[in-house]
């Protein structure tokens, strides 16, 4: 109805939900609520997967949707309207902004593995912390979900890459570190060379 489209409240705020600004919202979600929701996601996909690789693939696909939406929300909230076009810029964006928004902290490390491969490391990734893996799924790495988030951000930002998660032993630590390996497509590396990087 056209009469209500421009309606304003007494304080001059738009009453139509589409016209309201996107709120910042709380910066934290209850860890127990997140753990419960994530364990339900794992259980849902576990009943539909016949192998560990298939389950990790399904978790990665679920994470890609989250990553895609994270990029949209964080880009919308960023007032500078800046789009990352350099590889180092998007990696720093993921390492700091995306990781902090999702997991409440910056990732532990960001390293160059090869010319076209980068590794993001987290010593206590929350998606691996509270998951008890059954014996028949002993090698399951729920970090595949976080790898999917990274892939969703990278692909939507114009940096196509193959992204996977694996465990790495850390001296003096009982649990292994989760590494997210990003192998970028050749066109990304060519563009980076043209822009004067790499």
Image (cartoon, rainbow, N blue to C red):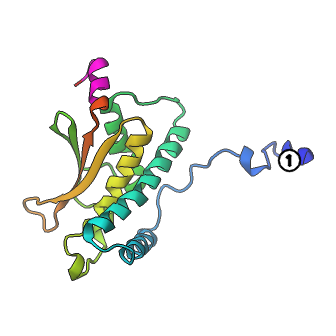
Task: Look at the image and say whether residue 194 sits in the magenta stretch.
Answer: yes
- Taking the image as shown, residue 6 lies to the left or right of residue 69, namely right
Please tell me in which quadrant of the rendered image residue 58 appears. bottom left
SS of the residue at dot 1? loop
The one of 164 and 50 positioned closer to us in this rendering: 50
* Residue most extreme to the left: 171
Q: Is residue 181 left or right of residue 40?
A: left
Measured as percent of width and height from the top left, residue 163 is found at: 29, 49
* Residue 99 seen anywhere in this rendered image of the structure: no
Residue at x-position 34% and y-position 28%? 86
The stretch of residues the image draws in magenta is 189-197
Residue bearing the label numbered 1 = 10
- The part of the image, by quadrant, that contains residue 183 is top left
Residue 66 image position (x, y, % from top left):
46, 54
Say which of 51 and 67 sits in front. Answer: 51
Q: Does the image show residue 164?
A: yes
Q: Seen in the image, is 74 located left or right of residue 5? A: left
Looking at the image, residue 130 lies above or below residue 176: below
Count of marks placed on residues: 1
Dot 1: within a 10 Å radius of its alpha carbon, few (fewer than 14), some, or many (20 or more) residues?
A: few
Q: Which residue is the extreme one toward the right?
A: 3
Q: Decide whether the magenta segment is chiefly helix, strand or loop.
A: helix
Residue 45 lies in magenta, yes or no?
Answer: no
- Residue 102: image x %, image y %? 41, 55
Give me the residue at 31% from left, 31% from top: 188
Q: Quadrant of the C terminus?
A: top left
Percent position of residue 111, x then y: 19, 41
Of residues 122 and 197, the one nearer the viewer is 197
Of all residues, the one furthest to the bottom in this rendering is 135
């Amino acid at each position: 109805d056209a009469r209500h489209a421009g309606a304003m409240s007494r304080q001059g705020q738009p009453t139509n939900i589409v016209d309201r600004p996107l709120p910042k919202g709380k910066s934290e979600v209850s860890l127990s609520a997140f753990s419960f929701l994530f364990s339900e996601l794992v259980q849902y996909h576990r009943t539909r997967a016949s192998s560990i690789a298939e389950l990790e693939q399904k978790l990665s696909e679920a994470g890609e949707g989250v990553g895609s939406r994270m990029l949209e929300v964080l880009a919308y909230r960023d007032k500078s309207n800046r789009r990352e076009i350099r590889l180092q810029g998007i990696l720093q964006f993921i390492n700091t902004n995306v990781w902090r928004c999702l997991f409440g902290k910056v990732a532990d490390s960001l390293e160059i593995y090869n010319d076209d491969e980068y590794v993001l490391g987290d010593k206590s990734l929350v998606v691996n912390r509270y998951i008890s893996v059954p014996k028949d799924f002993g090698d399951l790495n729920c970090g595949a979900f976080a790898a999917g988030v990274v892939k969703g951000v990278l692909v939507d930002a114009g940096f196509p890459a193959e992204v996977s998660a694996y465990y790495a032993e850390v001296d003096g630590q009982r649990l292994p570190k989760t590494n997210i390996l990003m192998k970028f497509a050749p066109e990304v590396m060519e563009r980076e060379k043209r822009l004067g990087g790499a």
